[in-house]
């Protein structure tokens, strides 16, 4: 495979007075097909990119990483640990580096069709001194899948021009390998040693940046993948960061997936480009020591736990400006995939701001609103230290016209002063307005075997709870049917699951199979919540009296249960219209059975799986020739 190499400059209108930045893109991997090498356990995909020159002013670099279904292969399945590295700088005969830019944990992709893709992003500005001129970026894909499955990989570096926030003054490489954890013959504290360094003259901030994930499955705690353990970072003997290395996976924006995606893990989740931990400490030049301590632990069996760590210490000058704020993201409203769980939204726009000034940020003026509607102003107050972020919830409805809209945010007057650089004070997001629904509809909620995990709330535009189902009201395997009548306006209907495994999860068949669905007054399906939803799901909508849903636009709800089976499974289909259905049952991508049905609307189908071989079994439903559902089945051996 030849590396893809090109650079595309997208130049916005630029005037010195308005401090408008230039945004450039360097794409090193453009839908590169990546597969495992099962003999080695990893496969390396290098590609070169031409980055800005050494003297080009870089404000921020964001690495966008997209994985999609490859053109000529099936989508890969397993949750493997991948690394994105800066391998060389300055051409083929240039400087060898080997720094880890980012860490990708691949999703369980067996249920994703052709055309599927997902985009993540991470800030890599700390490496800006190395992302100059000709740079070799290497994607290391680990794992043992065969060459019939893979990913389409795109890596796009988005570079914002502008004055640097800090002057980089050097970098110290810290701990960069996989360290055994719990092994009494290779204790982690004997290998994860403190590091002494001398901070250079003029350095005021030492930034520790860490990528850290746990892997392996030992006894008795399931370390490191499935055990929570704490980690301390110390500088000169003082703890600057203490945290439990554990992550809630039930709120992953990418869901459902074809495996155990809901299970919380050792600081990572399947389908996630990990955000690094970043700690800033103001220091004086001279001798210093940095150390990392893991919670003491000794395994008793199946010893295989590994703490995979990549850590660097960047030295910087003090912040160049006293009052300098930037908008990091528009979270609500947004069509960005990383904010999928929170959108479309009816109320309360939500943004993330970052203080880039030396002074603590204590006040800020925020002007926001949807294009075509009157702008609103919010006076934020708080206490934000340098490089810290805050999520700001802005009051009011999310106004919008049907379909696509543009939402804009403008920050000004940090601490009542003029912002030092306004090029990162304004942002726009494209968003889809909540859809229209009848003001009268029927809500059907079938509980699973664990209804005490669930809450349902319907909230109006003044945060008033109009309808609710709470755990004390619910009984197992019970269908609740309620007629809802609403005034015209915006609403949000939310389902939550405190156990983080939704209304149905294939690996826990004893929990049962539940659903939450909306029907019009004639019994036609108008919306179905995803049962395999982890922590839950929400729907924002506009209630319109007299609105009649268009039944020419198909709506479907599917249930495949059980999916951890030895013999039988059942597929149920609910729709708002008659459709011709084809069901394909594949094993490791090979079609074993094809079933065709005419005029399906509401139906249940039973399938005998006893004759199928072991493997990756997928049940796919095509409605009128279009794939609308894919469910992964794990076949158990009979004892």
Image (cartoon, rainbow, N blue to C red):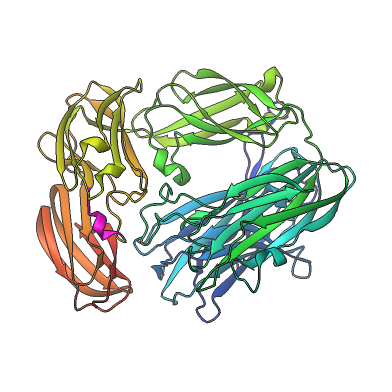
| Rendered-image quadrant of the C terminus | bottom left
Residue 193 location (% of width, % of height)? 74, 62
Q: Quadrant of residue 212?
A: bottom right
530 sits left or right of 249 in the view: left
Q: Is residue 504 magenta?
A: no
Q: Nearer the viewer, residue 90 or 301?
A: 301
Q: Which residues lie in the magenta part? A: 508-514
| Rendered-image quadrant of the N terminus | bottom right
Q: Residue at x 86, y 41 (%)?
A: 284
Q: Is residue 511 above or below residue 454?
A: below
8 sits left or right of 603 in the view: right
Q: Nearer the viewer, residue 72 or 357?
A: 357
In this orientation, does residue 577 appear?
yes
Residue 12 location (% of width, % of height)? 62, 37
384 sits left or right of 359 in the view: left
149 sits left or right of 508 in the view: right
Residue 488 location (% of width, % of height)? 25, 21
In this orientation, does residue 1 appear?
no
How many numbered marks does the figure carry?
Answer: 0
Residue most extreme to the bottom: 39
Q: Is residue 511 magenta?
A: yes
Residue 419 location (% of width, % of height)? 70, 25
Q: Is residue 555 above or below residue 561?
A: above
């Amino acid at each position: 495979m030849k590396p893809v190499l090109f650079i595309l400059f997208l130049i916005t209108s630029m005037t010195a007075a308005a401090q408008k930045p230039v945004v450039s893109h360097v794409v090193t991997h453009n839908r590169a097909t990546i597969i495992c090498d099962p003999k080695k356990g990893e496969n390396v995909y290098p590609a070169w990119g031409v980055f800005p020159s050494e003297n080009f002013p870089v404000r921020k670099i964001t690495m966008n990483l997209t994985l999609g279904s490859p053109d000529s292969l099936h989508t890969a399945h397993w949750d493997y640990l991948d690394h994105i590295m800066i391998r060389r700088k300055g051409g083929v005969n240039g400087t060898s580096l080997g720094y880890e830019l980012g860490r990708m944990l691949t999703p369980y992709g067996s249920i994703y069709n052709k055309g599927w893709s997902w985009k993540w992003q991470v800030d890599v500005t700390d490496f800006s001194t190395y992302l100059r001129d000709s740079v070799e970026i290497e994607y290391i894909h680990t794992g043992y899948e065969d060459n019939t499955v893979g990913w389409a990989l795109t890596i796009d570096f988005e570079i914002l021009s502008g004055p640097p926030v800090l002057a980089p003054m050097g970098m110290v490489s810290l701990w960069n390998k996989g360290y055994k954890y719990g092994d009494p013959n290779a204790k982690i504290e004997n290998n994860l040693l403190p590091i002494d360094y001398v901070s250079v003259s003029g350095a005021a901030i030492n930034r520790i940046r860490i990528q850290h994930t746990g892997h392996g499955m030992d006894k008795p705690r399931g370390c490191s993948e499935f055990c929570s353990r704490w980690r301390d970072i110390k500088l000169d003997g003082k703890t600057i960061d203490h945290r439990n290395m554990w992550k809630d996976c039930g709120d992953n924006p990418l869901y459902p997936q074809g495996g155990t995606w809901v299970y919380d893990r050792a600081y990572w989740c399947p389908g996630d480009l990990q955000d690094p931990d970043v700690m800033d400490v103001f220091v004086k030049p001279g001798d210093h020591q940095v150390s990392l301590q893991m919670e003491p632990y000794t395994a008793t069996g199946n010893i295989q736990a590994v703490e995979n760590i990549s850590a660097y210490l960047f030295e910087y000058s003090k912040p160049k400006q006293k009052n300098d704020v930037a908008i990091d993201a528009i979270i609500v409203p947004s069509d960005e995939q990383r904010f999928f769980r929170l959108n479309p939204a009816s109320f309360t726009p939500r943004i993330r701001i970052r203080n880039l000034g030396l002074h603590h940020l204590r006040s800020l003026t925020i002007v926001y609103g949807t294009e075509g509607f009157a702008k609103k102003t919010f006076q934020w107050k708080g206490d934000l230290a340098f490089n810290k972020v805050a999520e700001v919830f802005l009051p009011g409805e999310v106004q919008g016209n049907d379909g696509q809209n543009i939402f804009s945010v403008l920050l000004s007057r940090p601490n009542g002063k003029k912002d030092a650089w306004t090029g990162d004070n304004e942002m726009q997001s494209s968003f889809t307005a909540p859809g229209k629904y009848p003001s009268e509809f029927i809500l059907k909620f079938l509980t699973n075997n664990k209804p005490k995990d669930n809450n349902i709330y319907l909230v109006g535009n003044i945060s008033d709870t109009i309808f609710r189902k709470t755990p004390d009201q619910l009984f197992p395997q019970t269908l609740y049917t309620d007629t809802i009548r609403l005034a015209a306006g915006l609403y949000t209907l939310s389902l939550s699951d405190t156990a983080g495994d939704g209304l149905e999860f294939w690996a826990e068949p004893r929990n049962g199979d539940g659903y939450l669905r909306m029907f019009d007054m004639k019994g036609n399906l108008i919306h179905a919540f995803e049962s395999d939803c982890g922590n839950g799901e929400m729907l924002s909508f506009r209630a319109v009296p007299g609105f009649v849903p268009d039944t020419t636009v198909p709506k479907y709800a599917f249930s495949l249960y059980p999916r951890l089976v030895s013999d039988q499974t059942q597929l149920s289909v609910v729709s708002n219209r008659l459709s011709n259905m084809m069901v394909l049952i594949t094993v490791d991508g090979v079609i074993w059975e094809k079933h065709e049905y005419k005029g399906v609307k509401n139906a249940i189908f039973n399938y005998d799986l006893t004759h199928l071989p072991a493997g990756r079994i997928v049940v796919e439903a095509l409605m009128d020739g279009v794939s609308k559902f894919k469910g992964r089945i794990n076949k158990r051996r009979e004892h």
